[in-house]
Amino acid sequence: MTHQSNWTSPSGSFVYNDIWGYADTAGNEYAIIGSSWGTHFVNVTQMDSVFLVDEFVGWNTNATWRDFKTYEHYAFGVSDDGGSSLQIFDLQYLPDSVVKIYDHDSLSESTHNIFIFGSRLYLINNKGNSPSFYSYGIRVVDISNPHLPKTIGVLNDALYAPAHDAYVRNDTVYISDGSINGLQVVDYTDINNPTNIGSLTSYPDKGYNHASWGTPDGKTMVMTDETHGSNIKVLDISNSSSITVVSTFESDPASIAHNPFILDTLAIISYYHDGVQVWDIEDPANPIHVGYYDTDTSIGNGGNYAGFQGCWGVYPFLPSRNIIASDRGQGLYVVTMDWYTGDTIQPPPPPTFLESYRNSEILEVYPNPSSGQFAIGSRLILDEEVWISVLDSKGAIKKEFPLYLEGGTKSVDFSDLEKGVYFLKLRSINYERSEKIIIR
């Protein structure tokens, strides 16, 4: 992944938090990024030359948490710090300016996260001041008229009191509990009678479920436990009453995953100290690490993994497919996934030339034979992305994926293949080599 630009507010030295994106009808693209001070709207249309359009102070100017979502040409913002408000912004005047149309604490003086599906705004872990102080696991607001948002339902059962975040698909709400209750699934078909239809409270490497995101077909979900050393879980959610973990994956074992999103078959995750991390989950049982960009190299790599610094949020849904991310200390980043065309991951083209080198200089595979765990290395291809194919003895492709040869070598796991003889092929822009491997 390639860094394109970076932005921090000229208004002061702030700590940054969450991020969302927006594209106007003219094709201009924007980042909506939160800071301790407030909300900033940044034009990112020209990815290498971004600039501030507008910014608005929050009620609490020392806020750790903010969250944003968009509906039509409106943006909604909340903060999970007391003395805050629900703010609604009209974006129809972009690229010139943004207009704030609502700012009140009656619906929210504190909300940890929000989600919008259709014209419903879900306020998660919500507190407010109308008609008196209240606290709900979830408050559902009708925003069909964003100038006059109104409550249409609440979820205040004790089971959902520690609700931390939610992912909504149609009338089904997947609640990330944020404590011991894991994942709770609620059917909101009847807004006045939400019904629990499933849960996942016991699972491998359990920490506390911070956030989740599902695939468009409603079959698979990625779930992050915001706990040091907890793997990311890939879930089969095709049957809400019987949710299962089909695989797990991680970046550095000491780091912390934060917010996950799914674009096509890619799980794109803000991973605190390890920046933006990307896995291909087309095969949910076999996630493949396909890309990353570290937003702050001053931490990690044996550094301050005990803290909660680095990449807080990421937004992968801009029409350009550029990635915008927020780093707590470094502000807004724009990066690109060089190997991603917008709907699929593509291998590199055939080599433009093939020089005469010994095979071992281009492709090293060890130990070989192996039970399935191999290291793939190259003396010539260093810190470069290559395309790996594994073919059986008849030439059928059994696996195919991009791989970044960090430091010239990378570990791979083929233990899910049957025992036997295979051919591993490496392809880069300039080289193509193959090696026989044996899985025993």
Image (spheres, rainbow, N blue to C red):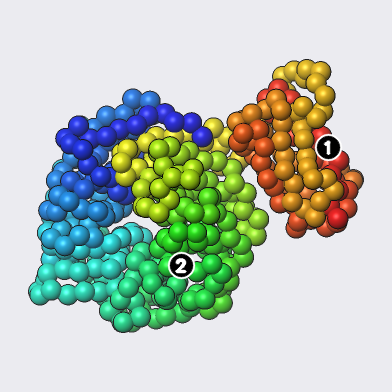
Disc number for residue 207: 2
Near mark 1 (Cα within 10 A), the count class, few <14, some 14-19 or many ≥20, is some
Query: Which quadrant holds residue 310?
Result: top left
In this rendering, is residue 50 above or below 190? above
Which mark lies nearer to you, 2 or 1?
2
Amino acid marked by disc 2: Gly
Disc number for residue 104: none
In this rendering, is residue 109 above or below 404? below
In this rendering, is residue 146 above or below 246? above
- Judged left or right of residue 57, residue 422 is right
Q: Residue at x 31, y 82 (%)?
A: 158
Q: Residue at x 42, y 80 (%)?
A: 196
Kindly tell me whether residue 52 is visible in this rendering: yes
Q: Earlier in the sequence, mark 2 or mark 1?
A: 2
Q: Position of residue 332 (x, y in %)?
A: 33, 38
Query: Which quadrant holds residue 106?
Result: bottom left
What residue sits right under mark 1 in the picture? 435
Q: Residue at x 74, y 51 (%)?
A: 373
Q: Is 348 in front, or is 381?
A: 381
Secondary element under disc 2, as helix, strand or loop, is loop
Q: Position of residue 353 (x, y in %)?
A: 75, 18
Amino acid marked by disc 1: Glu
- Judged left or right of residue 135, residue 46 is right
Near mark 2 (Cα within 10 A), the count class, few <14, some 14-19 or many ≥20, is some
Q: Residue at x 22, y 57 (%)?
A: 79
How far apart are the two marked residues, 2 and 1, measured between alpha carbons? 41 Å
Secondary element under disc 1, as helix, strand or loop, is strand
Query: Which quadrant holds residue 211?
Result: bottom left
- Judged left or right of residue 392, residue 125 is left
The C terminus lies in which quarter of the figure? bottom right
